[in-house]
Structures are given as structure tokens and as C-alpha cells.
């Protein structure tokens, strides 16, 4: 049974505070909201992902930077990531798409 649901008031608060916000839903029905990363957050993600010693933390760090619900400092957030340890990897794909990453982007000659 989902425990993390965003009610209408919270949705309005998130939009007012962060502007554009994306929501994903886990297979269990928990909702997670995130904002688009800033250029600095994206550069930090790329630098971490390219560092062999730190690579395993890149997805989770990016998720912590941009998730606006649940609060990344909350017990609910910690429990969610403990229950679904691969969630940061799945989230990073959605986050990168929101930031403009397009898999298979095609260029054409002018």
C-alpha cells in the first residue's frame, strides 16, 4: 500500500515553490516529486559519474539534489531508498529527461 502520496495542497505548494515539478510513481504507488536540476547540479552529477571511485553515488546524489517530495532529509525518504535500492538509478533517467536529455536524439544535415 502506498504511503507517499501528494495531495492537492502539497502539489500547489510544490509548484509555487519550485515552478515546474515532475512526479513519478513507484510500482507500489508511492509518489516522488522532483524539479529539474540546475546546470551546476548537472555538472556535479556528470563529474561524479565519471569518477570511478564515486560513480556508484552519482544517481543517489542527483536524486537528493532535486527531489522535493518526500523531503530528502525525512525518514520517509530514507525508508523509500532502503526499500527500493535501485530507485535512484531509475529516477536519474527521468531527471535527466526533464533536464533535456533525449535518448537517440537524431541530427540532420542542413
Image (tube, rainbow, N blue to C red):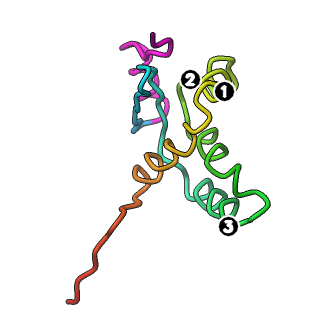
Residue with the most extreme right position: 53
Q: Is residue 8 magenta?
A: yes
Return the x and y of residue 36 as percentages of the image width and height.
47, 46
Q: Distance between the residues labelled 3 and 1?
A: 25 Å
Mark 1 surroundings: few (<14), some (14-19) or many (≥20) residues within 10 A:
few
Disc 3 to disc 1: CB gap under 8 Å = no
- Left or right: residue 69 compared with residue 45: left
Residue with the most extreme left position: 110
Identify the residue under disc 2.
Answer: 70
Which type of secondary structure does the marked residue at label 1 adopt? helix
Viewer-side label of 3, 1: 1
**Which of 52 and 39 lies nearest the eye of the viewer?**
52
Predominant SS along the magenta part: helix
Q: Quadrant of residue 5?
A: top left
Residue at 52 percent of width and 47 percent of height: 92
Residue with the most extreme bottom position: 110
Mark positioned earlier in the residue sequence (1 or 2): 2
Mark 2 surroundings: few (<14), some (14-19) or many (≥20) residues within 10 A:
many
Magenta part of the chain: 1-18
Rendered position, 84 above or below 43: above
Residue at 22 percent of width and 89 percent of height: 109
Residue 50, which numbered label? 3
Return the x and y of residue 64 as percentages of the image width and height.
63, 38
Rendered position, 1 above or below 68: above
Residue at 56 percent of width and 23 percent of height: 70
Q: Does the magenta stretch include residue 81?
A: no
Viewer-side label of 2, 3: 3
Return the x and y of residue 93 as percentages of the image width and height.
46, 50
**Which of 60 and 109 lies nearest the eye of the viewer?**
60
Figure quadrant of the N terminus: top left
Identify the residue under disc 1.
Answer: 82
Amino acid at each position: 500500500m502506498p504511503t507517499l502520496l501528494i495531495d492537492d495542497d502539497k502539489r500547489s505548494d510544490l509548484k509555487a515553490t519550485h515552478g515546474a515539478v515532475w512526479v513519478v510513481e513507484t510500482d507500489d504507488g508511492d509518489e516522488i516529486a522532483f524539479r529539474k536540476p540546475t546546470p551546476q547540479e548537472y555538472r556535479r552529477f556528470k563529474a561524479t559519474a565519471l569518477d570511478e571511485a564515486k560513480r556508484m553515488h552519482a544517481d543517489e546524489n542527483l536524486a537528493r539534489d532535486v527531489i522535493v517530495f518526500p523531503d530528502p532529509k525525512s525518514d520517509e525518504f530514507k525508508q523509500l531508498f532502503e526499500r527500493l535500492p535501485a530507485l535512484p538509478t531509475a529516477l536519474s533517467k527521468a531527471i535527466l529527461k526533464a533536464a533535456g536529455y533525449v535518448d537517440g536524439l537524431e541530427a540532420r544535415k542542413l
